[in-house]
Amino acid sequence: MFWVIEGTYDYKRSKGDDPNTSFVVLREEIGFQTVYRWVPFVRLNYENYSGTSESDSADQLSWGPHFATFLPRHRI
């Protein structure tokens, strides 16, 4: 089993009457590495923008199953 978690947070204080902005990104992968060269995993992406558009915030969440494969090493 393996997992990868990456995250970013950015906050900017505005000048004057403009709203402050923040940006959050979270990416995760959770899966199994098998002996048959197929790697099934689930990928999750989350993004949140605040103060960058006319709306108060913009959340986006997406996820889905994925498959990867790896090639065997051959001697040349």
Image (cartoon, grey):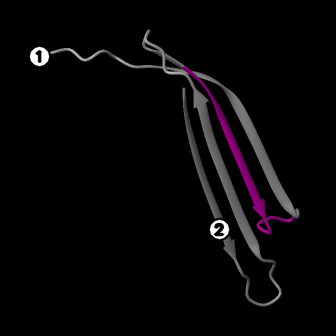
The magenta-colored residue range is 40-54
Q: List the residue tagged with mark 1.
A: 76
Q: Amino acid at mark 2?
A: Asp
Q: Position of residue 9 (x, y in %)?
A: 65, 63
Q: Amino acid at mark 1?
A: Ile
The quarter of the rendered structure image containing the C terminus is top left
Percent across and percent down for residue 53 are 80, 64
Q: Residues within 10 Å of mark 1 (few under 14, many from 20)?
A: few
Q: Regarding mark 1 in the picture, which secondary structure is present there?
A: loop
CA distance for labels 1 and 2: 47 Å
Q: Give the residue pinned by disc 2.
A: 10
Residue 70: x and y in percent read 39, 19
Mark 1 and mark 2 lie on one chain; the one further toward the N terminus is 2
Circle number at residue 20: none
In this view, the residue in front, 69 or 52, is 69
- Closest to the observer, 68 or 19: 68
Q: Magenta region's main secondary structure?
A: strand
